[in-house]
Image: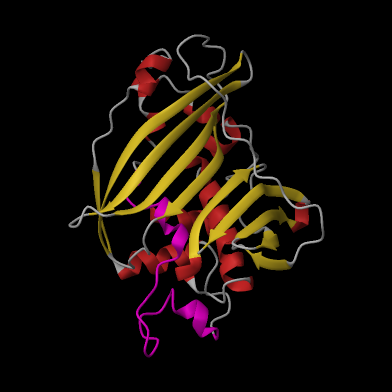
Amino acid sequence: MNTPFNPHALLSRRFAPIEHIYTLRDSQLYALGIGLGAEPLDEKQLSYLYEGVEGQSLRAVPTMANVLAYPGFWAREPDTGIDWRKLVHAEQEIVLHKPLPASGCVVGHNRITALWDKGPGKGALMQQQREVRGGTSGALLATVTQLTLLRGNGGFGAGGSEGAPPAPHALPDRAPDRVHDARSLPQAALIYRLSGDLNPLHADPTVARAAGFERPILHGMATMGFAAHAVLAAVLDYDAARFAGMRVRFTAPALPGDTLRTEMWLDGNVVSLRTTALERGAVVLNNSRVDLR
């Protein structure tokens, strides 16, 4: 039996630290899950996929921070009171304090930082934050912030957070400076979930239909990874060292098999971006940005 939704209990929920030991193989699998490797003769892509590139060590894609020491699909646990079948990922942000190693041990510390009631029938917004630290050194590697729309838990009234969620990033009012297209594989969600996000919405047609989708959808964080790949390819010449952070707003689900077009605007160390599923004309990421060093 599920526990009734209690905002006070959710905001004070405790999470045990999560130790995550990962290998070069995990970094390679993550890179495959966000579309790298489509050009097998491109050695700059291979530097994230193949450990044998002469003179180079294997690199980790910066957005791999999203899956390191990930607490899992904890919202499905009955004591949360969350209607997990109606949960939708709204925004995701990463800040990289140090370059991510391609293998090693990290520890994640997760907490719920805010809960905003949108009103009866409108859902609620839950913000959680995770610090990813080196398992031996304790050095802060990345801060990961996730904003989730709880479509089935609005109207609780008292007990939420003050203030308002962060305002969306404004896109420039001009033609984009760069455009990058990437075709996602029909099995993209099944590959990406092997990096640790096991929400059945992305694999089980029955669960997807119960949530109002006609088929399993691509993970929001996989869509974010495709957009990060676009910036690496079109702006950074695959130099991950310049990638300092990223914030995206999910505006529609991407489907495995979609061609994802990412439009980019370059203004100093800020790359504004928008990603569209071309075949359906659906904007899947909007008001998004990458911060450069």
Q: Is residue 276 above or below residue 23?
A: above
Q: Residue at x 38, y 90 (%)?
A: 54
Q: Is residue 186 above or below residue 150?
A: below
Q: What percent of the width, then of the height, locates residue 107?
A: 25, 49
Give the residues drawn in magenta, as a range.
Answer: 41-70
Q: What percent of the width, then of the height, locates residue 192?
A: 47, 56
Residue furthest to the right in view is 174
Q: Nearer the viewer, residue 23 or 265?
A: 265
- Residue 187 visible in the displayed image: no
Q: What percent of the width, then of the height, locates residue 180?
A: 69, 68
In the rendered image, which quarter contains the N terminus? top left
- Residue 12 visible in the displayed image: yes
Main SS, magenta residues = loop
Q: Is residue 203 above or below residue 260?
A: above
Q: Residue at x 53, y 22 (%)?
A: 116
Q: Residue at x 38, y 52 (%)?
A: 142
Residue 121 picture quarter? top right
